[in-house]
Image (cartoon, rainbow, N blue to C red):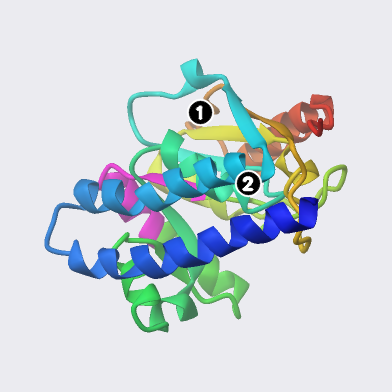
């Protein structure tokens, strides 16, 4: 039954993607905030559809930590869930993606209209420079910048290497950092088709200031807070 419910979810996700992708192009003449609102209706639908099909819900703790001014968000990366939920918490935002995705007809053009930070994954040094350069511009434009410091999804209980890109951006831009932890990987495991029912907890941490700190210090503070918080979150499966 879990497999069937998960397949229904993916069917809805695919159909909604086909319908929404062209909207990024059609809405291009509108302001960025208007485009962002229109495109994120896809996100609203998919989180609702996830609840309907797979009985996966979520709750947010620490909303009072979210400042009025856009800054850098550094989040634990366990699944695709957080890439959806964060879009509705930190509005509007820019996220990091592979430059090749922008070359996909229609879909890639729609992504390009959302002003992502497009990087070349083949070179670490070049990608860090692109994150800093483009990230500073996005922050200047009033967009939250979303970064997954481990660079790839990790299973619950595991920890990847925290890369310095987010810390470097914080130092260069002077922007503060908001750390985010969650336990979504239990219900939406990486490389697994099945979605398990339960309630995901997403925790927003206190602001980590970047003033008079090195990229290494900022990254270490983020890592300590995220990993300590993640370890305290239980398996949310029903």
Specify whether residue 70 is in view.
yes
Helix, strand or loop at disc 2? helix
Return the x and y of residue 221 as percentages of the image width and height: 67, 33
Location of residue 75 (image quadrant)? top right
Looking at the picture, tell me which residue is in the foreground, 121 or 11.
11
Label ID, residue 19: none
Q: Which residue appears farthest toward the top when viewing the image?
A: 64
For image coordinates 78% across by 57% down, the residue present is 3
Looking at the picture, tell me which residue is in the foreground, 173 or 203.
203
Judge the density around disc 2: few (<14), some (14-19), many (≥20) Cα neighbours within 10 Å: some
Is residue 141 in the magenta section?
A: yes
Highlighted magenta segment, given as a residue range:
134-146
Is residue 88 in the magenta section?
A: no
Location of residue 71 (image quadrant)? top left
Residue at mark 1: 209
Residue at mark 2: 53
Whether residue 69 sits left or right of residue 218 in the image: it is left
Give the vertical position of 202 relative to 39 (above or below): above
For image coordinates 55% across by 50% down, the residue present is 83
């Amino acid at each position: 039954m879990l497999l069937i419910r998960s397949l229904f979810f993916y069917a809805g996700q695919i159909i909604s993607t086909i319908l929404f992708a062209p909207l990024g192009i059609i809405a291009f003449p509108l302001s960025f905030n208007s485009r962002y609102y229109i495109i994120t209706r896809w996100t609203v639908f998919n989180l609702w559809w996830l609840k309907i099909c797979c009985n996966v819900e979520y709750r947010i703790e620490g909303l009072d930590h979210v400042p009025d001014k856009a800054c850098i968000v550094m989040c634990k990366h366990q699944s695709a869930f957080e890439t959806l939920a964060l879009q509705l918490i930190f509005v509007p935002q820019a996220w990091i993606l592979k430059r090749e995705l922008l070359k996909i007809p229609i879909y890639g053009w729609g992504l390009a209209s959302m002003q992502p930070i497009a990087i070349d994954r083949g070179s670490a040094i070049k990608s860090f420079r692109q994150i800093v350069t483009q990230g500073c511009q996005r922050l200047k434009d009033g967009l939250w910048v979303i970064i997954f410091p481990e660079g790839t999804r990790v299973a619950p209980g595991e920890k990847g290497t925290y890369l310095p890109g987010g810390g470097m951006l914080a130092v260069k831009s002077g922007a503060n950092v908001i750390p985010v932890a969650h336990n979504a990987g239990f219900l939406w495991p990486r490389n697994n088709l099945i979605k398990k029912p339960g309630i995901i907890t997403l925790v927003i941490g206190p602001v980590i200031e970047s003033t008079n700190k090195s990229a290494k210090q900022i990254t270490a503070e983020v890592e300590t807070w995220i990993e300590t918080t993640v370890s305290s979150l239980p398996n949310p499966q029903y």
